[in-house]
Structure formats: C-alpha cells, structure tokens
Amino acid sequence: MMKNVCFFNSTVFWGGGEKLHLEYALEFQKKNYDVIIAVKNGSPLSEKSSKNGLESVDVSVRNLSFLNPIKIIKLIRFYRQRKIDTVIFSVPQDLKLGSIAAKLAGVKRIVYLRGLAVPIRYNLLNHFIFKYLTTHIVANSQETKRNILQNLGKYIDDDKVKTIYHGIDIESLNSNDDHKNESIISKGHGVILGSAGRLTKQKGQHHLIEIARKLKEKGIDFTLFIAGTGELEDELSHLIDQYNLQKDVILLGFVKDMDCFMKSIDIFLLTSIWEGFGYVLVESMIKSKPVIAFDITSNPEIITQNETGFLINYPDVDAFAEKTQLLIQNEYIRNLLGENGRMSVINRFNITDRISEFEYHLLGRDYVIPNKLPVYTYMVLPSEHRTVSYLHAKNVV
C-alpha cells in the first residue's frame, strides 16, 4: 500500500533534479496520491510547487545536517505526523539527513533518484545509507546505473538499482503552436543549428565553435544558436571572434522557452563529454529535429544510430562536422531522422508510462510495457552520403 508520498529536495536553485521532482509530484498527485514536497522556502521549486497547487513544507539542509539530532527529531516527527510511507530524494545531502530520519520513523520506502553519471564515492556513511537505509535506487540511464555500482557494487545488489528513463509530457511539448524564437528568426541565415546547456566544460561547447569553423570554411550557409549561460561564456565569445564567426554563431544566453527554441531550429547538436540523461535530446526529438551527439555515456541509450540521429566517436569534430554538413545539405534525411526521433520519444519517454513504471517498481510489481507505435527506420551509407530507402515498421522498446 502506498498513499502518502514526500518528495524531498532542499536545493535553492533550479535544475534537472528539481524539474524531475516537480513533474513526478504532479503526476503522482494525478494518480490520487497524497503528495507533499519538502523544500526550501523561496527556492524556485518552492515557488513552482505553490503555483501548481502542491502542498509543501519548509526544510533547510546542509552537508553536515545529518549530524544534527534536532533536525533528525523534527523530520521523524514530520514523517510520523503526515504518515509518510514513501520519501524520494535526489540530492546527496538531503539523502544523508532524510534517510536516517525516515528509517527511524518507519517509512516503508526510502528512494534515491540518481541523475549524475559519475561514480558515488565509497565511504562508510555511503555504505551504510545505500546498503541499509535506501530501499530503492533509481538511475536515469544504464550509464548512471553503471556509475552507481562502480564503487558500491560489492555492497549492494545489482537488482536494487533500477533504470527508469526520464519522461516528458508529450502532450504539452507536441503542440501545434508555431510560435518561434524572435532572435533566431531575425538573426538566422541558412539552415539553423541549435544547442542548449550550461556553458561549462562538461557540455563541450568549444567543440561546437570548431565544428562551425569547419562548416564555414566549406562555404556552407548556416547559423548556430547556443542557448545557455555559464562560466565559459567569455571564453566561447573569444573563440567566436577569433574565427570571425560573429554572424554564424550566436550565444543566446538564458532561454526561458525551450519549446519555442526547439521549434525554431532545423538540427540539434550536443557536444557534451558526459550526460546522465540527455533530456535536451529528447526535447529536440519530440519536435522532429534530427540530433547529432558524441557516442559517449548515455547518448546511445537515447539516439539510435542512423535511425533517430548520428553518434560520433569522441572527440572527432571532423566527423561531427561531416554529419552536420550531410544533414544541412539533405532535407530528406533531416526529415526522416526527425520523424523517427519523434516517434521514438513517444514510444520510450512518455512521462505517463515512465511514472507508471516508477510506481510499479516501488510497489514491487512488474511493469507491463504498453503497445508501441510504429517507428520507420532507414539505412544511411555515410561513405556515399546518401540514403537507401528501406522503410519498415519497427517497435521500439
């Protein structure tokens, strides 16, 4: 029996984990669970929860809060008063404090959602938490699961870690609204390339600048728009100036409406050097945009090579530029990849299906995969830069 669910997230900024908590909380509420979010007052998650009619309670957590007996006692009291039977974490410092209190309060399900594809450091505290306190560990990709088990695999069973991909709201993102980004419309020329993510080393946007330089040297008409802010903004701006790409590569800064951004581009490029789950790839694919990314970490779990996009050996920017050129110059392949990608997302990343899978996992039941829509596949012969048209229906699981 599962009725009272607490999503516990004290983070003061807005990121992928906070977005996931909000979406999952809303979906659980739709399923008639009593949902409460433990959140820091004034945080973006707190404000968005309030706007969406979710009940919340104020929590403040620091890295060493798990050593504070007063905080533990308050949390135990909260869990018991609200009869919480399931508590879900995604932030390590929250897990340290909240899982100890949950165990002492007799909470039946103590769940950790892991979205980072980096190993969890082994120490006695993590050993204790992951072996004895958490009841369920959910990874957002097989790559993330591999990293969880890298240091902890000797102490926790493989089947304790379940891979459940992030889901997206297909209905809201698959709308017929044709509104597009005004900056892209006014400044764009040629085929429009897009990329989005924080301007950090992880996202590897310097590779994008190099790819753009190679395309321009070949006389290809394109504009690359990069959405996002971060510590590498000045460095990337310098590279753009150095290669005289001011009219060809444009840093858009923070883009609030990613749905509008995706509608405005023709091809999506992702040059990250690692991803826990490339949510932005899924966002572009549902808009029927072909995608190109490096063949690393979780990207191959989202992109099917030569069917929904292209995967490039890292860090081969020459091959990346060649595939980008192929898509720029061949609208047929662009459209085919894009349509394949859209149907793949519908089949594999529908939030309703993923929430059901998550729910069934917590309840100890097998999740039955729903009927799939047909996805049309094709074969590309890269050496000849042309397609061989064998279209056939294929179920994507």
Image (spheres, helix red, strand yellow):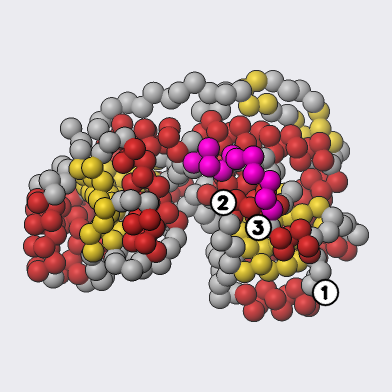
The kind of secondary structure element at disc 2 is helix
Q: Label 3 is placed on what type of residue?
A: Ser
Per the image, the residue denoted by label 3 is 195
Q: Which mark is residue 311?
A: none
Mark 2 and mark 3: Cα distance apart in space: 9 Å
Label 3's element? strand
Locate the N terminus by quadrant. Answer: top left
> Looking at the magenta stretch, what is its main secondary structure?
loop
Say whether residue 89 is left or right of residue 276.
left
Is mark 1 in CB contact (under 8 Å) with mark 3?
A: no
Q: Earlier in the sequence, mark 2 or mark 1?
A: 1
Specify the label residue 280 is tagged with. Answer: 2
- Using the image, determine if residue 5 lies above or below residue 190: above
Residue toward you, 304 or 244: 244
Q: Is residue 178 magenta?
A: yes
Amino acid, disc 1: Asn
Task: Give the Cα distance between marks 2 and 1.
Answer: 28 Å
**Which residue appears at 31% of the width and 51% of the height?**
54
- Distance between the alpha carbons at the discs numbered 1 and 3: 19 Å
Q: Which image quadrant is residue 200 in? A: bottom right
Provide the residue designation for mark 1.
244
Of pointers 1 and 3, the one earlier in the residue sequence: 3
Asked whether disc 2 touches disc 3, contact meaning CB atoms under 8 Å apart, the reply is no
In this image, 210 relative to 256: left or right? right
Membership of 271 in magenta stretch:
no
The amino acid on which the numbered mark 2 sits, given as a three-letter code, is Val
* Label 1, residues with CA under 10 Å away: few <14, some 14-19, many ≥20: few
Disc 1 on helix, strand or loop? loop
